[in-house]
Image (cartoon, rainbow, N blue to C red):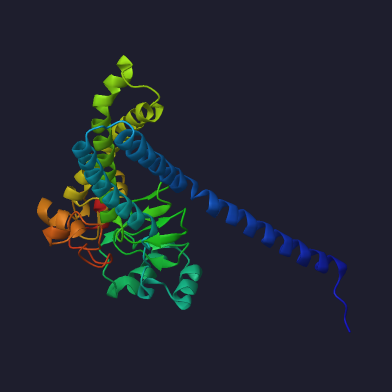
Amino acid sequence: MMSMPHGQSYDYHRTTFDGERNERCGCCVRTMKWFPVLFIASVIGWSYYAFVIQLSFFTVTNIVQRILFLLFYHAVLVMFLWSYYQTVFTDIGRVPSRFHVPRAELDRIVRATNEVEQKEILETFAKELPVVTRTLNASVRFCDKCRLIKPDRAHHCSVCGVCVLKLDHHCPWVNNCINFTNYKYFILFLGYALLYCVYVACSTIPYMELLWTGKIDGRFHILFLFFVSVMFAISLVSLFGYHVYLVLLNRTTLESFRTPIFRFGGPDKNGFSLGKLNNFQEVFGDDWRLWFVPVYTSLGDGIVFPCRDVAPYSIEFAA
């Protein structure tokens, strides 16, 4: 029987060790990605204790006022947590298999002698696909990592390691991509988080004066709750306003910095804009009763997006 050379055996064990080490490192990285989510959950848990126990039960003496405080607080909290849960745990979806370039076509691309040939191969393959956006040199948008033709508005997320439909951005605070499948939930999360912070801050203002004048004491949690809620509200108001602005323009965060280029018409930041109402309904749906409820109502499939009529586009416009 032929024995394995010593060096080859050593390489095998080293490769195995490296694989196990990489797996452990990957597990640690995946765990660390949940730290921001746990931080948000901890802040919400502490704020619940501070508002319900310290403020409502230990400080508010009027029974009617206490009941009203708690009713509205829990209504906002439920919508806030529901939206956050949907944003965090909604699957980002997958690019359909018909966009994946077959092995035979990939081999042809590798054997191509120049970029023109590669462009022609991709253009031929994408001829039957519903894609209207292109690269700067008017080529079909191809992801060499996922080996697929990118659908319109899809981009590769370096954190998730996959191409994501209508990618807006990757948010570490939810450990998820904000994209076609959860964009409505994300905006509702920002809106209800802002409402939560504003309500908590406004509810604690009258008792801040009592704390300041010494009429009540030992309520450090109320004092800290006020400043934390104000701090988060200031951060959220600009972020929430910006994303409402993007929704009304039918534009993603990526598209606001990197103008999409259309096969016909060239670069156009407003190429997907269909009017403010239609833009809003594309994300929130056409049933107004569900606009502010974190359930899926977005229109479309994340693959094909209606766009404005534009003039023919040629390579000269991209130069």
**Up/down of 66 relative to 157, above or below:** above
Q: Residue furthest bottom?
A: 1
Horizontal arrangement in the rendering, residue 138 relative to residue 172 (left or right):
left
Query: In percent of the image, x 25 and y 50: which residue is there?
Result: 188
Q: Quadrant of the N terminus?
A: bottom right
Q: Is residue 76 above or below residue 297?
A: above
1 and 133: which is toward the camera: 1
User: How many marks overall?
Assistant: 0
Name the residue at 38% across, 40% down.
49
**Of the pair 229 and 71, the residue shown nearer to us:** 71
Q: Position of residue 189 (x, y in %)?
A: 29, 49
Quadrant hosting residue 298: bottom left
171 on left or right of 1: left
**Can you say whether 200 is above or below 34 in the image?**
above
- Determine if residue 312 is in view: no
Q: Pick the residue in front: 219 or 191.
A: 219
Residue 215 rendering spot, x and y as whole percentages: 31, 18
Q: Position of residue 60 (x, y in %)?
A: 27, 32
Q: Residue furthest top?
A: 213
Examine the image and state in which quarter residue 45 appears.
top left
Image location of residue 97, percent across then percent down: 38, 75
Residue 282 lies, with reference to residue 64, above or below; the image says below
Residue depicted at 35% across the width and 63% down the height: 150
**Residue 170 visible to the viewer:** yes
Which one is in front, 302 or 40?
40
Residue located 87% across and 68% down the image:
6
Q: Is residue 123 left or right of residue 8?
A: left
